Image (cartoon, rainbow, N blue to C red):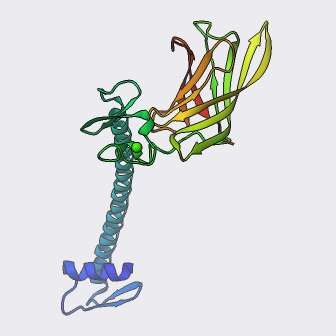
Amino acid sequence: MWGLLVCALVLALGLVNADSPCVCNYGSYHGHHKSSRGCSALQGRVDLQTARISRLSARIQELQSKLDEGQSKRDKLSSQQADISHRLHDLEPHECDKGEFSCGKGDNTCVSNLLVCDGTNDCDDGHDEEHDRCHSPVTSGSVFSAKIHEDPHQCTKRRLNSIKIAITSVRQFNWFKSRVLISANAILDHSDHEHTQIDTLAVHGYYNFARRRLVFHPPEDDRLAVICEFDGVDNDSCHGSVLHEASLDHCLEFHAVRETH
Ligand SMILES: [Ca+2]
């Protein structure tokens, strides 16, 4: 191949004339010239062009690498832009009442949270039934864990080190599709007088599609409930809170992450 390219270059640049025809065999070049000195000069120029071709090829490869790298960066930026648009949509001011869902995207319609992901389009564009929203990230067998760094309000009666929520069952009924009933074990690692202890509480609750929120009813007489809210982008983590059932005051915040095996 190189021989053919070199020959073509030589012909194109006029390095040979009609009296000294170029004879090319595959992989080599043979030129006829009247003197050995002329042949040597010709060979020198051919070598020079060969070197230039090599440099140009290397340059082309370098440019191709930069183009590939640029494409990768464009793809990443495009993905980040989609994520931001998604988050902004959820952060848009809502005129809807508590317990309602905004159809958004220019549609000011509000529908009850209970109509979100119930299998029927209630927003004009079907926003309340979009696959991304109606796909619950809380599946049976999944485990979410969180470190508790501090409990400034002394929220719970335990000095918690960590919370682990192990989902034991997930049920969804055709007559109540907008809620997924969840059962789990809340595994509480806590310290008491320098002794570490683990308590496991059976908890029950539901997943709310409209708010992308996992809710557990209070399992003990201190009436503390637990919620964990997903952001619609990262299904492997949620922002958790412990709150008083009566006042709904949040007294402890945590970041729970899905455990992978
Ligand atoms: Ca609906």
Question: Could you say which is closer to the camera, residue 56 or residue 163?
Answer: 163
Which residue is rendered at x = 31% and y = 76% of the image?
46
Residue 15 in sight in this render? no
Location of residue 104 (image quadrant): top left
Residue 41 in the image: state x and y as whole percent.
Answer: 28, 77
Residue 108 horizontal side relative to residue 259, left or right: left
Question: Could you say which is closer to the camera, residue 191 or residue 70?
Answer: 191
Which residue is rendered at x = 45% and y = 36% of the image?
114
Residue 171 in the image: state x and y as whole percent.
Answer: 62, 42
Which residue is rendered at x = 37% and y = 49% of the image?
75
Quadrant containing ligand 1 reads top left
Location of residue 55 (image quadrant): bottom left
Residue 212 in sight in this render? yes
Residue 176 in the image: state x and y as whole percent.
Answer: 52, 41
194 lies above or below 105 = above
Residue 74 in the image: state x and y as whole percent.
Answer: 34, 48
Residue 65 horizontal side relative to residue 11, left or right: right
Location of residue 26 (image quadrant): bottom left
119 lies above or below 95 = below
32 lies above or below 239 = below
Residue 248 horizontal side relative to residue 156, left or right: left
